[in-house]
Amino acid sequence: MTRRVSFGSDNHSGVHPRVMEAIARANEGHVHAYGDDPWTAEAIGHLRSVLGDDIDVAFTFNGTGANVVTLATICRPWESVICAETAHINVDECAAPERIAGVKLVPVATPDGKLTPELVRPHLTGFGFQHHAQPRVISVSQASEYGTVYTVGELRALADLAHAHGMLLHVDGARFANAVAHLGCTPAAMLEDGGVDALSFGGTKNGMLLGEAVVLIHGAPADTLAFVRKQCGQLASKMRFVAAQFSAMLADGLWLETAAHANAMAARIAEGVQTLGVEVTQPVQANEVFALLPADRTPQLAERFGFYTWDTARGEVRLVTSWDTQPEDVDALVAAVREIIS
Ligand SMILES: Cc1ncc(COP(=O)(O)O)c(C=O)c1O
């Protein structure tokens, strides 16, 4: 089969060879199921050394599962979650947070996918009023769905606001690695200094076959986590194969290498198309590029390179890079863009 390049999603890429090898290595003999095995203990150890010791961890199959399990664990059914209008939990999870976690989502319009205290504050109302859902969580995506990244200070400002109201800060980190690679900080510092209480830690988009992790920090209510995950259908029986992938990614920094590479490929796209006079509509800080292309000539290009139109009215497209995107792939894309705009 010939290699087909897609800029449609970081889920379009395959699995990193070292992750595949780790899965094969874990395929040895019999061990206990449901996470009671040495591979799972090892992977949790790696997560603790990367994210900080004082965390509770539960692996899940996918990102929607990680978000739903997190919200169902830290919220009660009368509580609400404030998020960006563009948040994955709001637009791409088929109302699973509402149906399964039983929370009310409060979507907030943002120019760049990022919440700010100013945008959130008007929604912090009705505390103690029995007719209103009670605000419980501010949820941000790091990196955001627009490929923008919160600085640690921006996270801290949201965390301080949340904590001042007895609320928690949740980070949907399906692209957490891309954000860490962009900021160049340590992940533990982002969580600690950013005041984060709960993290959905991504693996799949960054080169794993499947697997994400719910991470609850500093004792954010963790006593029900295992039960909630099981009820949500996110408890893998053969957990060692999820865990072995995390160890392969985390043990020697592979997860940041793959993310930094994807980020660099996005920067290469942005630079290439901007040189042609194409408008890039969002700061390129992670592995996504949003750009305006002539709508009538885009479909052919989209067919060849697999990307999606984000905003039809504006002719805005979304280009996503992966751990295995090659510079030649980017150069072929930029050359094709040159053809349609010349
Ligand atoms: C911000 C964000 N969160 C979570 C997810 C995970 O979704 P899935 O349930 O498809 O793994 C995605 C995937 O597109 C995402 O972009």
Image (spheres, rainbow, N blue to C red):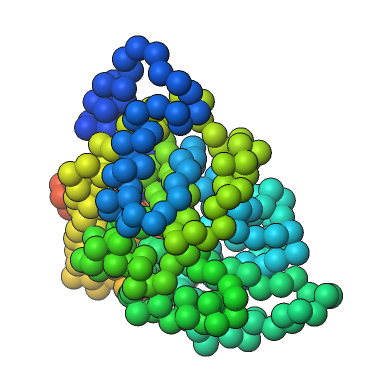
Where, quadrant-wise, is the C terminus in this rendering?
bottom left
Q: Residue at x 35, y 79 (%)?
A: 153
Residue extending farthest right: 131
Q: Position of residue 272 (x, y in %)?
A: 19, 63
Say if 71 sits above or below 9 in the image: below
Q: Nearer the viewer, residue 192 or 108?
A: 192
Q: Position of residue 147 (x, y in %)?
A: 37, 64
Residue extending farthest top: 29
Q: Residue at x 55, y 82 (%)?
A: 164
Say if 300 sits above or below 264 in the image: above
Say if 39 sits above or below 62 in the image: above
Residue 181 visible? The answer is yes
Q: Quadrant of residue 79?
A: bottom right
Q: Nearer the viewer, residue 184 or 5?
A: 184
Q: Residue at x 80, y 80 (%)?
A: 129
Where, quadrant-wise, is the N terminus in this rendering?
top left
Q: Position of residue 108 (x, y in %)?
A: 59, 75
Q: Nearer the viewer, residue 303 or 328?
A: 328
Q: Residue at x 21, y 56 (%)?
A: 260
Residue 334 visible? The answer is no
Q: Is residue 31 left or right of residue 287?
A: right
Q: Is residue 92 left or right of residue 255?
A: right
Q: How many marks?
A: 0
Q: Quadrant of residue 244?
A: top left
Q: Nearer the viewer, residue 54 or 67?
A: 54
Q: Position of residue 247 (x, y in %)?
A: 28, 38
Say if 233 sits above or below 129 in the image: above
